[in-house]
Amino acid sequence: MQPNHSFTYDTIILGGGIVGAATAEALVRRGHTVLLLEQFAPGHTRGSSHGDGRIIRFAYPEPIYIEMALLAYPGWASLAERAGEPLVQTTGGWDAGPAASPHLHELEENFRRYHIPYERLSAAESNRRFPHFYLEGSSEAIFQPEAGVVFATSAVLALWRLFEAAGGIAVTGERVEAIEVLGEQIRVRSVSGVHWQARHLVVAAGGWSRTLLAALGLSLPLEAAQEQVAYFAPRDEMDHRAGAMPIFIDYHTEYPFYGLPQIQVPGVKIGWHHTGPVIDPDDPQPFDHANLLGVQDFVRARLPHLNPESFEQITCLYTNTPDYHFILDRHPEFPNIVVGTGFSGHGFKFAPVLGDILAALVLGEATPLDLSPFAISRFERANLSRRTGA
């Protein structure tokens, strides 16, 4: 179905990554007429939603994210059923750090609070149980069996497919140039001069959200960082495939290392969380080889069965807030504009819930979680935390 430029949609959504697509699918499933605008193509590699996998886990120091994960797991199961394809694979999750690590303590406290199964392992126990990793005697690990991987690009494409099958209208290759608020209506105009109109607008444009919202008088402290990950091939017969190896986060350094077992690419994906440079999302930078050297040193120290020379590297954008927590709110001046951004490198796993939350904000319904931690107004506060992991 082709877009009707004279038609007033119920909702226009800017950004077709995982959050924008999940919101679009949630709204069209509720009978809304929805236009999804994406400046690139579905599943493109310029943003934050591409790749063979993303981590899904309960291992968070903040209770709000555990509560969100408790909704996300059944949300992914429902999406997979609607899509007719698997989108999540359970691998278990391995978090490690010094024995006195506050990160491990917080994870353990929250697992107990929410009755989530886990095991605390000494270095020797971890080395026997998970020989993929090597821990020194002064370190410990926590294993949580329900963590896993979400098939990232597959999930994005599944949402696009479901959205369009339900009657949603998608337009790609059009970059938004201007947004006008005309009373109860919103008009969106592209660089090519095409314009569309709707009663509601959802801005879920990742690294481009700051510029779009600034044009609406909303200045948000968002930064787009170019992060990178590298793939490492096994050097021996140790099985590193999903199901044989858990996802992992290592807290021995100020910024944690994280990784996923082999999914589609024939190697283990590893990144160094929040260590990429701040960039203009329209001006991607060359791959940072100094960062790669740090990841390779981590592989040599912690993953003895991998070749420490990476065979493939990719980049992605993190759209970061100062406290690394999300923005899920209405525009303070225009309540028919909803903002979903600032996912800071850890939002993908919650996509089904985020889509439902943003849809509820559009529809004026109660949200399934308390959204005060994600309010725009919090940026007036002075004490900002930067703790949240990958």
Image (cartoon, helix red, strand yellow):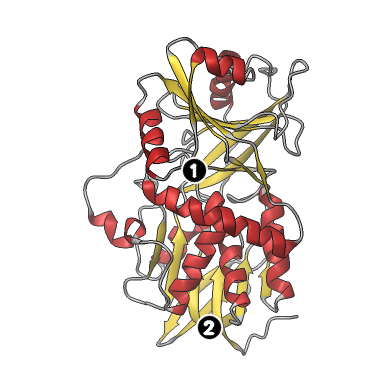
Query: Within 10 angstroms of label 2, few (less than 14), some, or many (20 or more) residues?
Result: many
Amino acid beneath label 1: Phe
Q: Which residue is mark 1?
A: 58
Q: Which residue is found at the position 23% from the left and 45% from the top?
A: 383
Q: Quadrant of the N terminus?
A: bottom right
Quarter of the image where one finds residue 370: bottom left
Q: Is residue 298 left or right of residue 183?
A: right
Q: Which residue is found at the position 54% from the left and 78% from the top?
A: 11
**Nearer to us: label 2 or label 1:** 1
Q: Is residue 225 left or right of residue 15?
A: left
Query: Within 10 angstroms of label 1, few (less than 14), some, or many (20 or more) residues?
Result: many
| Place of residue 345 in the rendered image (x, y in percent of width and height, measured from the top left) | 50, 45
Up the image or down, 168 lies above or below 213; here it is: below
Quarter of the image where one finds residue 295: top right
Amino acid beneath label 2: Ala
The reply to whether residue 10 is in sight is yes
| Place of residue 232 in the rendered image (x, y in percent of width and height, measured from the top left) | 69, 25
| Place of residue 123 in the rendered image (x, y in percent of width and height, measured from the top left) | 50, 15
Up the image or down, 171 lies above or below 288; here it is: below
Q: Is residue 193 left or right of residue 382?
A: right
Q: Which residue is found at the position 78% from the left and 17% from the top?
A: 237
Q: Which residue is mark 2?
A: 198
Up the image or down, 323 lies above or below 236; here it is: below
Q: Which mark is residue 238?
A: none
| Mark with earlier residue (2, 1) | 1
| Place of residue 187 in the rendered image (x, y in percent of width and height, measured from the top left) | 51, 81
